Image (cartoon, rainbow, N blue to C red):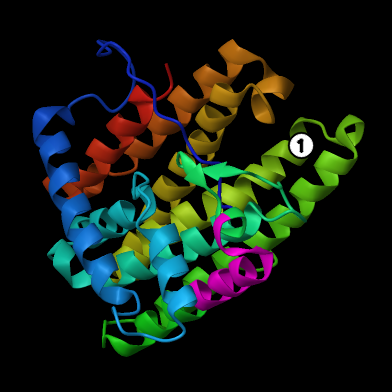
């Protein structure tokens, strides 16, 4: 049950116009630095070398450590920093979010869902380890994520768990996947309204929850969490618009290429504007918005 399709970033010339400019090299360096820390902690989070059963350990590591942009865990770090707390305080939450995202991809690739042969340039989990093991790998990643969310002693742990659970449940990711399956089986009945609902549930819900969970881990006040939720919702829908633009499906088919790109730009610009009260503390969230816009092409 993937929260957004696998976004394929293509090399493009540097943009001189568009939203969220100013991430620049400093922003790129920060993204690289935090990505490395997240990769390190993800490896520590997963079952160790002697864990049993070995096939489950190997398959979990295969799926989680296969690359990816780590966009959602980076948003967790950004949300934490925006409320004035060092991003390291939210690394366990960031790793849990990535485990949840990976679980959704493993299940989304299954024969009963997208029946995909490849993910991130390598065989999907069920192609390499078998369908039954892939189902259990997804279950194991989902369970491990909530174990980490509940054991680190982070502030607002219950609020974080509630926020992420809602984003992954029937009103979020899983509900969005059901609507996606219906849209695939009845393509003529799926219009713009359907694809917007899918984008909101299947992609934007977890992206927004990532920012809010990071802010809560940093001790956010209610008004701060609410404002960052708005940033995440805008970035989340823009993420799906850009993904559909690359694949020429979903909202891109419903709206057309130019309108899809224009809406993504508008949403990213508006999301960045909501960060104004946070000042320099939200610089990393601005850098992530700038990165997202460079993928629009």
Magenta stretch prevailing secondary structure: helix
Question: How many numbered tags mark residues here?
Answer: 1
* Residue 9, quarter of the rendered image: top left
- In the image, residue 49 sits, relative to residue 60, either above or below, namely below
- In the image, residue 120 sits, relative to residue 162, either above or below, namely above
Mark 1 crowdedness (10 Å alpha carbons): few <14, some 14-19, many ≥20: few
Q: Which residue is painted at 42% across and 49% down in the image?
A: 232
Q: Which residue is painted at 68% across and 56% down in the image?
A: 110
Q: Which residue is painted at 39% across and 38% down in the image?
A: 271
Tell me if 42 is positioned left or right of 141 in this view: left
* Residue 13, quarter of the rendered image: top left
Query: Residue 8, position in %: x, y?
Result: 45, 31
**The magenta stretch spans residue 220:** no
Say which residue label 1 marks: 193
Query: Residue 214, position in %: x, y?
Result: 31, 64
Check the picture and name the quadrant holding the N terminus.
bottom right
| Magenta segment boundaries in residue numbering | 128-142
Query: Residue 181, position in %: x, y?
Result: 79, 49
Query: Residue 179, position in %: x, y?
Result: 78, 51
Q: Front-most of 51 and 144?
A: 51
Q: Front-most of 43 and 95?
A: 43
Tell me if 186 is positioned left or right of 149 in this view: right
Evaluate whether residue 123 shows in this view. Answer: yes
Evaluate whether residue 172 shows in this view. Answer: no
């Amino acid at each position: 049950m993937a929260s957004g399709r696998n976004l394929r970033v293509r090399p493009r010339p540097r943009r001189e116009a568009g939203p969220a400019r100013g991430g620049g090299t400093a922003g790129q360096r920060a993204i690289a630095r935090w990505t490395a820390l997240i990769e390190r902690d993800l490896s520590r989070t997963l079952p160790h070398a002697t864990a049993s059963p070995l096939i489950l350990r190997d398959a979990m590591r295969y799926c989680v450590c296969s690359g990816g942009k780590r966009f959602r865990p980076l948003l967790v770090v950004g949300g934490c920093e925006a409320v004035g707390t060092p991003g390291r305080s939210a690394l366990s939450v960031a790793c849990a979010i990535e485990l949840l995202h990976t679980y959704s991809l493993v299940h989304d690739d299954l024969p009963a869902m997208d029946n995909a042969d490849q993910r991130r340039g390598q065989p999907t989990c069920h192609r390499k380890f078998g369908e039954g093991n892939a189902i259990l790998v997804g279950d194991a990643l989902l369970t491990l994520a909530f174990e980490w969310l509940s054991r680190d002693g982070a502030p607002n742990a219950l609020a974080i768990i509630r926020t992420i659970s809602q984003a992954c449940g029937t009103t979020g990711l899983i509900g969005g996947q059901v609507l996606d399956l219906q849209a695939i089986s009845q393509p003529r009945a799926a219009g713009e309204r359907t694809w917007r609902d899918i984008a909101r549930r299947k992609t934007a819900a977890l992206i927004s929850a990532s920012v809010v969970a990071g802010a809560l881990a940093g001790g956010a006040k209610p008004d701060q969490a609410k404002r960052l939720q708005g940033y995440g919702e805008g970035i989340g829908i823009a993420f799906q618009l850009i993904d559909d633009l690359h694949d020429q499906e979903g909202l891109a088919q419903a709206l057309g290429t130019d309108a899809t790109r224009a809406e993504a730009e508008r949403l990213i610009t508006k999301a960045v504007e909501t960060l104004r009260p946070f000042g320099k503390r939200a610089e990393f969230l601005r850098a992530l918005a700038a990165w997202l816009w460079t993928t629009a092409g």
